[in-house]
Amino acid sequence: MAFDDVVRVLDETRVVAVITRRADGTRVATPIWAMVVDGVPYLRSAYGPSSWWYRHVLAGRDVEFALGDGRIAERDRQAALELPSEAVAVESVPEDDPIQRDIDRVLDAKYAAEPDSIAAMKSPEAMGCTLRVVAP
């Protein structure tokens, strides 16, 4: 597997499974949304900095993505952990970075059927929790 596989899954898959680690090292899968702008993947924490997957990332714990349909994590987090996965790194994106507008544009297009959820993802709190996904 390669980082290109991660980019493809994050671009083509409606719900992705981000895999982080708890303090004790246990892997946990969380279903989230992802947006790809000009071949670069981005994430936002719809629940802002209080989301535990986001806190795991900020704590410097390992981050991976399941290379399959992340909706499985909505029903069975353990099954999502059994999918092939690829490690990634992340970088914070400032709220005033011009890429934020492009992320919003992709968000609007990819998730048009869920306007209430889009609104949460475009809130100032969520925008302050934007991450760029990069190769490790």
Image (cartoon, rainbow, N blue to C red):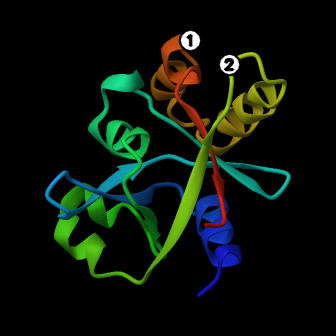
Q: What's the amino acid at mark 2?
A: Glu
Residue at the disc numbered 2: 95
| Residue 116 position within the rendered picture, expressed as x and y whole percent measured from the top left | 46, 22
Q: Which residue is drawn at 14% across and 58% down?
A: 24
Q: Residue at x 81, y 58 (%)?
A: 39
**Residue 108 tag number:** none
Q: Taking 12 as reference, is 40 left or right?
A: right
Residue at the disc numbered 1: 124
Height in image: 21 above or below 119?
below
Of the pair 25 and 109, the residue shown nearer to us = 25
Q: Residue at x 30, y 25 (%)?
A: 50
Earlier in the chain: of badge 2 and badge 1, it is 2
Of the pair 13 and 127, the residue shown nearer to us = 127
| Residue 78 position within the rendered picture, expressed as x and y whole percent measured from the top left | 18, 71
Q: Taking 80 as reference, is 36 left or right?
A: right
Marks 2/1 in contact by CB < 8 Å: the verdict is yes
Q: Taking 134 as reference, is 40 left or right?
A: right
In whole angstroms, how far apart are the C-alphas of marks 2 and 1?
8 Å
Residue ranking furthest to the left: 24
Q: Residue at x 59, y 88 (%)?
A: 1
Residue 40 quadrant: bottom right
| Residue 86 position within the rendered picture, expressed as x and y whole percent measured from the top left | 50, 75
| Residue 82 position within the rendered picture, expressed as x and y whole percent measured from the top left | 27, 81
Which quarter of the figure is the C terminus placed in? bottom right
Residue ranking furthest to the bottom: 1
